[in-house]
Amino acid sequence: MEKIMAKIDLSNISHTYNPNDANPTYALNPFSMTWENGNRYAILGPSGCGKTTMLNIVSGLVKPSGGNILFDDKDVTDLKTESRNIAQVFQFPVIYNTMTVYDNLAFPLKCRNFSKEKIEERVQSVSQTLNLASFLNMPARKLTADQKQLISLGRGLVREDVAAVLMDEPLTVIDPDLKFRLRRSLKEINEQYKTTLVYVTHDQNEAMTFADNIIVMDQGEIVQVGLPKELFEKPKTTFVGYFIGSPAMNLFNSKVSSDYSIEFNNLLINTKTNLSKIKEKEIKFGIRSEFIKIAKDQKENLIDAKVSRVEDFGNFKLITGRVGDFEIKSKVERETSISSENIRLYLPPDKCCVYFKDKLVQ
Amino acid sequence: MYKLYTFLKYSFVTLWTMFVVAPFLWALSTSFKDFQSVNSKVTYIPWIDYQPSLEGWKVLIKSPAKGGVDIVEPYFNSIFVTCTASIISIILGTLAAYALSRFTFKAGFVRNNDITFFFISQRIMPPIVLSIPFFIFLSTIGLLDSLIGLVVVYIVLLMPIAVWIMVDFFNRVPKELDETALIDGCNPYQAFYKVVLPNSIPGLIVAGMFCIIFGWIDFFFAFILTFTEVQLLPVKVVALNSSVTPWWSLSASALVSVAPLIIVAFIVERYLSKGNLSGALK
């Protein structure tokens, strides 16, 4: 069968739930984005940031207040959900209680008038992938919660020509062990069938391990789109720095000193960022705790800190130190012995990020 | 402590059962008595205290011409009116309830909840308030003293029950179920009857049961809106009473008129206990 998967363009999409008010509050501020065919995307953000609204707009359950959605350059904004050929999996398993597992999986194909042989073939194939083959003749309501969620997933995957499979925190109800396996099989499915997968989550680890592109959202705004590495090393806003990574990025209020250096707690820190364009002096300076090292023979970017806490996480040690009024965290190898109360830390210049009005200076 | 609790529990259940069962036992034994055994002294045990007779039962199926009371025709009238009105109420009520549960209506200050309350308010109102309007309405359209007229009135009485139960039921069915059906390629109508409706059978059964009960036991409207052509069972049973109370046939007719409800209760109970109705969506 010909595969008709699509590139999805979201052009200038915005949405408000109270369009008639004088000052409507936007669940989604205007944005544009393109989802390339066959990629894996994760939408990451705290609860209530507009992730689900975005998915519902793509699947057609919600009509956007503004903007257009294009599947392969064809405008589908006014097309109803049932004509869009999108699959969506919700946070809690939704199954058709009165049907068997087989009928549940076959339902999307039956609705679209596929031939019996085709349905049989697809259901068998999907049930193999999801380990549901032995339950096919059971009533779907008799299965456990995670198996039910597998059925929901299966209904999304059973159509080969689907434009994209949208998943709204689909693994919430699933055991951690199975979660890991499922994420892997989702990846395999993506590689095998080249289905575009969009995965909404508030768990950064899930997003990082699953997707090749991560979309970070906050308060109806898309703050950054990028690879896991980019999000980690160069967060575009202080929110991303704070939200991604564990522990959160070290962020300090500081001042611009010269074109390539800042002043922080009366210490001069060199960066690789050109700061000449910043008019005001007040900035924020951020660095990941993973990049802060205990100084050996470095000459610059050194900070003396007073150790206030050392936590052993098994695979690493987290040092919390005080520098003046600030708290600084550094992740070091677990073999490192922290001998004295005072340590000298080294901040690599290329890992130092400077934020002006909470946005990364580039 | 636990033993005391069990003891109290079973005592209470026993006591309650006696309260419920005693009138039936009384009616059952009275229905087999004749004038003599009812009116002389107190009697309990058949063949010893009194000689059982089938007279009370026979009268029920004899035509009035032969000195009987013939409750067969009112019986079938009642079945027809109750079932027809219940089915129509369930169909209309379910559709209304689905709309009220899934779509947002606005008309001035009226919102979904107000519409739902309007339906229920029809039941809160004392029925006597409706009697004169119904009477005038039915006589205007020429349906007074007819089965169809009764069906119309009973739909008015039963539909609020159906709407009330089904709105509550649909509100508990997550809207993701409908949305999933849409995503899987159903149009909204298919989503309703292929997915939502099969999932709503428990609610439909409960609503249907209530409709049948309330339709079957209604005396007031059946009494006011019919005269000679049509008679429903409750009216007929009450009409059995005369200067000399025929306790035996009154008891027999009371038992046969309760019988359908008992059967309905047993069927529904069987169905409920099989677990077919449980396990909603999670």
Image (cartoon, coloured by chain):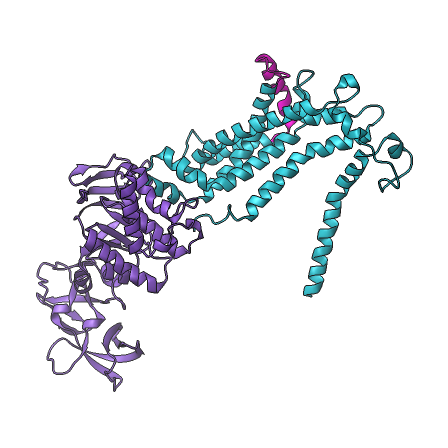
Segment tinted magenta in the rendering: B125-146
Q: Nearer the viewer, residue B245 or A294?
A: B245
Q: Does the magenta run of residues contain A30?
A: no
Residue that appears at 41% across and 49% down: A140
Q: Dominant secondary structure of the magenta stretch?
A: helix
Count of numbered badges drawn on the protein: 0
Q: Which chain is cyan in the rendering?
A: B
Q: Is residue A109 left or right of residue A267?
A: right
**B41 above or below A231?**
above
State whether residue A53 appears in this view.
no
Q: Nearer the viewer, residue A84 or A188?
A: A188
Quarter residue B64 falls in: top right
Q: Nearer the viewer, residue A208 or A1?
A: A1
**B113 above or below A135?**
above
Q: Which chain is purple in the rendering?
A: A
Residue that appears at 36% across and 47% down: A102
State whether residue B269 appears in this view.
yes
Quarter residue A256 falls in: bottom left
| Quadrant including the N terminus of chain B | bottom right
